[in-house]
Amino acid sequence: MVDVSGKDVTRRTALAEGTVEMRAQTMAEIYDGTLAKGDVLAVARVAGIQAAKRCSDLIPLCHPLPITRVSVRFERIAETVLRIEAECRVEGSTGVEMEALTAVSIAALTVYDMCKAVDKGMEISAVRLVAKEGGKSGPWLREEGVREQEGA
């Protein structure tokens, strides 16, 4: 692990997002609450929160962090596309980007698990960091073309 003991303790936040594309009927069943496994979004929200809290158990070199806030939100952005957004916050010496990304990923996988009986063709995509604040590097906000700006 990277030694972060010399870094200042500051409020750090991270916002991540991702999407799950599915059939329109699957989306309707999620919002109608008619899927056999139950309330998809409630279960996926809890799964995302748990995943953020357990990030260091899942990703070998992540620091365990005393997370002070995790929120997981869902938005139907098209008839067939569900957007998942996770925000994490900590007062610490390292950021919470991995926790937010993990929350989105696990929430998306939970949506897939709960809906796979009716739609095996769902696609999880666009999991990415949207914004971060705190720490030495300061705020960062995703802009279109960010990969080119960073030389990736």
Image (cartoon, helix red, strand yellow):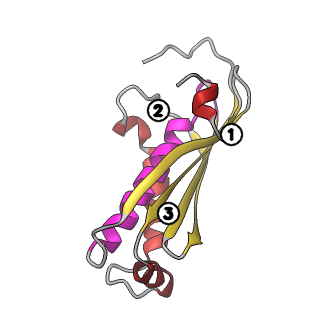
Counting from the top left corner in percent of width and height, residue 30 is at: 45, 79
**In the rendered image of this protein, does residue 80 appear above or below residue 130?**
below
Circle 3 crowding by C-alpha within 10 Å: few under 14, some 14–19, many from 20? many
**Mark sitting earlier along the chain (1/2):** 2
Task: Identify the magenta region.
Answer: 91-116
State the residue position of label 3. Answer: 45
Counting from the top left corner in percent of width and height, residue 15 is at: 62, 45
Circle nearer the viewer, 1 or 3: 1
**In the rendered image of this protein, does residue 46 appear above or below residue 39?**
above
Residue 64: numbered disc: 2
Q: Quadrant of residue 139?
A: top right
Label 1–label 3 contact, CB within 8 A: no
Compare residues 30 and 96 and report the one nearer the observer. 30
Counting from the top left corner in percent of width and height, residue 56 is at: 41, 35
Label 2 is placed on what type of residue?
Pro
* Magenta: main secondary structure: helix
Can see residue 50? no
Label 1–label 2 contact, CB within 8 A: no
**In the rendered image of this protein, does residue 31 appear above or below residue 21?**
below
Compare residues 27 and 99 and report the one nearer the observer. 27
Q: CA distance from mark 1 to mark 2?
A: 29 Å
Q: Quadrant of residue 89?
A: top right
Counting from the top left corner in percent of width and height, residue 152 is at: 52, 25
Label 3 is placed on what type of residue?
Arg
Circle nearer the viewer, 1 or 2: 1
**In the rendered image of this protein, does residue 75 appear above or below residue 6?**
below
Q: CA distance from mark 3 to mark 2?
A: 21 Å
Label 1 is placed on what type of residue?
Glu
Circle 2 crowding by C-alpha within 10 Å: few under 14, some 14–19, many from 20? few
Asked if residue 24 lies left or right of residue 140, the reply is left
In this figure, what is the number of numbered marks?
A: 3
State the residue position of label 1. Answer: 143
